[in-house]
Every structure is written in C-alpha cells, then in structure tokens.
Amino acid sequence: MKTKITDLLNIKYPIIQAGMVWVSGWELVSAVSNEGGLGLIGAGSMKPDLLKEHIKKCNAATDKPFGVNIPLLRKDADELVKASLDEGIKIFFTSAGNPKTFTSLLKEKGCTVVHVVANLKYGIKAQEAGCDAVVGEGVEAGGHNGADQITTFCLIPQLVDKLNIPVIAAGGIADGRGILAALSLGAEGVQIGTRFAATVESSAHQNFKDEIVKAGDQATVLAFKKIGLVRIIKNDFAIRAMKAESEGWNEIQLRELLATKRERIGIFEGDLIEGELEAGQGVGLINDIPTVKELFERLLNEIEITNRKNNNLYKG
Amino acid sequence: MKTKITDLLNIKYPIIQAGMVWVSGWELVSAVSNEGGLGLIGAGSMKPDLLKEHIKKCNAATDKPFGVNIPLLRKDADELVKASLDEGIKIFFTSAGNPKTFTSLLKEKGCTVVHVVANLKYGIKAQEAGCDAVVGEGVEAGGHNGADQITTFCLIPQLVDKLNIPVIAAGGIADGRGILAALSLGAEGVQIGTRFAATVESSAHQNFKDEIVKAGDQATVLAFKKIGLVRIIKNDFAIRAMKAESEGWNEIQLRELLATKRERIGIFEGDLIEGELEAGQGVGLINDIPTVKELFERLLNEIEITNRKNNNLYKG
C-alpha cells in the first residue's frame, strides 16, 4: 500500500501504533515495525534512561523504522528529546503541547516530526511550526482528549481540507473497516491505540488487556472536563469522578480525587478499581488478544474485503 | 448504487434525509426523493393536521417513496402515526422512545419501520421489536443524543456485527467522503441531517442556515446532560446552559433555563441568541446553501472520487 504517509515514514502499510503510556515498550514497537507498520515508543511513562534502554532494545529487535511519542506536558520533555536524539531516533511524534517547542530543532537534525492535534486551530499551528504531518485525534481516542470533543468523523475531513501536510487519523479505529473509513475521510494513514494495547506484545497488565476484551460499546466515559479531559473505562474510580463532576466539584477538589500515578496503577499494575484505565471508545470492537503479526494479517485482510465491498456498490 | 437499504426502501441511492424539526417539510422531502434519496417529513414539530397537509403536498410533488419521522416522546405520537397511515404513508422512522410501541401495528399495515438507536442495547431491542432496519446515530448528530455519547465511528461497526437487520449510519456525515466512510464501517446507507438543513428547500430560517455555513469545527456543544443530552450550536443560550451545568445546577433549575419552544425560536424564527440551534458537529464541513439537486450531484461525485482514491491504495 502506498500513501503520502508510507512515503514520508518509509513504511509498508499506513498503520501507526500509538505511543501509549505503560503499553508501548520496545517489544510492541519492534513487533509493529517488523510487520511493516510504524511502532512508537511511549515515552510518557519513561524517565530518559529507561527510554534510552527501550530504544536500544528496539534497535536490536528490528531494522525497520520506528519512532518515539513525546508528550510535551512532561516537564522533562527536553531530556526525553535529547535521550532520543542521542540514540539516533529520526521519527518524533509530539503531543499535548505547543508544536513550536521542538519542531525547528528536530528538523535541523534531519528528523521527521508529526504533531497530534484535536482541532483545526492546532492543525494549522503544527503546519506553521514546520511539522511534516499531523495526527488528527478524535474524541473517541483513549487517554487525554481535546476540550472541543471533536470526533474522528468530523475532525479528519476538516483537517484534510485546510492543511497541505498529510493527516493521520486516530480515535475509534480498531479494525480494517475503520482504517478504510479513515482513508475515505481523506487521511493518508491511521494511528491505532487501544487495539494494540490488547496484543500479546503490549506491556500492559493482563488484567487491563482482559478488561479491554470484556468492554462493550458503553464502556468508556470522558472524565475530568474541568482539569483535562480524559477517556477512561467506566470502573469504580471513573464512576466516583463522574459523580464529583456532576455535583460541581471545583478544580482543586477534582485534582485531589485524581491524585497521581493512577495510570500506572491501572494499566501497568492491573488495579481495575483504583486505576485510571485509559482506553478508546473502540474497546467494544476488541474481542481478543492476538499477536501483532496475527493482528496485521487480519487488518490488511479486512481493508481489502471492505474495499471490494465498496466497489460492488456500483455493480449492484 | 445498490445496497440492502436501497432494496428495502426502493430508492436509487442509499442516502436518507433526516426528519428534522422545523426543517424537513414537504419541499425538502420531495426534493430529496425526486433526486433518488429518501426524504423524511419531520413530524416532531407538527400537529397531526399540519402533518397531513405536508404529506398531501409531498404526494403531489413526487411519485417517489418518502416517509415520516415520528419522535416517540411526543405525547400525541399515536395521533401522528394515525395521521400518517390515513394519508397512505408506508415508511416510518421512529426515534426517541421504545421501538415496541408501534412496530407491530405498522408491520401489520404493511409498512417499513426503521428505528433510530444510539447504542447496541437499543439496536437489539429494535430488531426484536420487528424493525426492518435501524439508524445508528453517533453523538456527532445534531439535536437529541444518547447518554452514552457513542460516536459514529464506534457505533456503526458494533451494530453491524451484532444485528441481522441492515444499519443506516447517522451523525457527522456531510459529504461524499463521509458517506463512503460510513459504508466502509459496514452501514448499508446513511442518514444526513444538518447538511440538508442548509439547502434552499429546507424550511429553516435563513439566519439558521447562515449560522451553519459560518460554523467551524468547534461550533457545537453537548448541553443538558442531566435532563436529555442535545447537540446545539454554541450560541449565547448554549453558553449559559454550559455554565449552569458546570456549576452543578439540578434538573429543575435546568428545565427552567431550557423553558419551551427554544427549537422553534432558533431554527424556524431565526433568533440566534435565545434559540436552541440544533445542529451536528459536521457543521464545519458545510460552506454553502445549495439546492438539493446540486447537493446530490456533488455527493455522488465525491463518493466516486473517494472510492477511486481507495482503489489506488493498491496501485501505488
């Protein structure tokens, strides 16, 4: 398959695995890149030294391109960038911050830079900052979300119409039908998160993977609107958070309730009651825990079947 | 074009115009049906006598199939059903209520019944009630929405996987890319609302149509979570409602703020400050007010271009 994104990233299929905290370590990343997609190390849950270790191990496990995702809200984002450059990383996905912060520096170093955006305004900012592409992330996506709550269906075509750089679609994509739908909306590639979190190679806790498999169409909620919107599985903790919001708790009270390390507790340690279980609304489409290889075969097959079905529209 | 929905409804293209309050009168409906789609009269803003008048005028203006949309939360829904049957209506779309209420009766009368659902549970209920198809309506859609806030991208493939009856996709579809995306997700047809509200033949006030054209990607919000979620344009009234919710107002206070007839005031009378401007998140994709004929030509052309682009994926 060939799109502007396969050309830009020098990959075989326009399928990118999102750099998720506590999920996207070297095992998942190298497996995805070895199948012809692009794996992204999720630096958001790593200190610079650990990130270096993952990059080294990933380099040993694949000779295909892979990258890192760096959330710019991290206070030590500059150290994560430096660690990545030291280890020879050439593909950076940045998110949750101003695309101007590192893009010029990274472009000078000959890197490819992709910024994650949740509305048109930030898409334009990313293009102006010199990014090579954007990920348009719909509110279906797990984890942190834009306050505007724009869905994949509405966000992608608007970015495509207004930007000159290619758009990668993210949010709610969990199978080959979703991939072809995203490409139909004008995307040149897709970034898939939660579906890859529930694979054998994902470093998430087995409890979290099992929870994704069990989850249905109503399983996730958008919580913490006042202090930073996040999509999580509706577990005990999430229900408490929703109640607090409905009662009009203020920001300080909500921050106390949220506390810290809840992502780690939930996703990595497998505490399904107290943890913050970041997952996309597409969980209802996920019913097993395949290897990355099995998953890629399935996705590619589904894309082809869906395209054939679309062609039959005209044959009757 | 041929799908299970074009077969079921005996129409040329799998494109259905949503039955919107104050928007979908006989002029819009007959124009859509004459172009080969399915027009739906929006009975939600009509008394039974007015509905009869619209059906009569629509019958005079087209010999193609058209239908009515009946919101079951209306206390006089039975009278709207009777009025429609009296005038020979054979296609019923029901929404906002229990699909069991009228489906058996309507099936006995030889009618086609389609129910609008916003999650899987109600999709299964609609199928069990004997409906011929469902509309799966994502939270992108304008007006009343399901509390679960499931998006089109996530809702449609889950309905398709679990139901035996065909699924029509709604919510966020405003151009041919969106139509092919919806079909890729497994839908057999689409229901389009806001895009048709901003056409020459729509009975909405010109101010409302202009507001849709002006609106961008961040223009709509989900308001009134506690008393019935609704997607509206973020005007003065909507901002007041959001503030009230964020302060934890209770249901009684919110109902007082909402008051009555705000839809009419906004959509039909064109009061952009005090009105409740029901519109889908896809407003950002709408940049003109074409005739229905012009719109159909454009949509069909876009579907074809998009499908050709998808086929090129494999050619490189």
Image: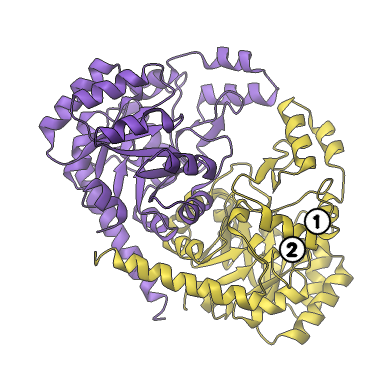
Chain colours: A yellow, B purple
Say which residue label 2 marks. Answer: A70
Question: Which residue shows up at 75% across the image and 41% down it?
Answer: A238
Name above or below for residue B313 compared with residue B253: below
Q: Secondary structure at mark 2?
A: strand
Classed neighbour count for the residue bearing mark 2: other residues with Cα under 10 Å, few (<14), some (14–19), many (≥20)? many
Of the pair B31 and A136, the residue shown nearer to us: B31
What percent of the width, then of the height, locates residue B210?
Answer: 35, 33
Of the pair B143 and A233, the residue shown nearer to us: A233
What percent of the width, then of the height, locates residue A253?
Answer: 84, 31
Q: Amino acid at mark 1?
A: Arg
* Mark 2 vs 1: CB contact within 8 A: yes
- The residue marked by circle 2 belongs to what chain? A
Q: Secondary structure at mark 1?
A: loop
Q: Amino acid at mark 2?
A: Ile
Question: Which residue shows up at 15% across the image and 25% down it?
Answer: B56
Say which residue label 1 marks. Answer: A74
Name above or below for residue A271 compared with residue A165: above
What percent of the width, then of the height, locates residue B189?
Answer: 34, 51
Spatial CA distance of label 2 from label 1 is 8 Å
Question: Which residue shows up at 44% across the image and 20% down it?
Answer: B275
The answer to whether residue B151 of the structure is visible from this angle is yes
Of the pair B21 and A80, the residue shown nearer to us: B21
Give the side of residue B26 with respect to residue A52, left or right.
Answer: left
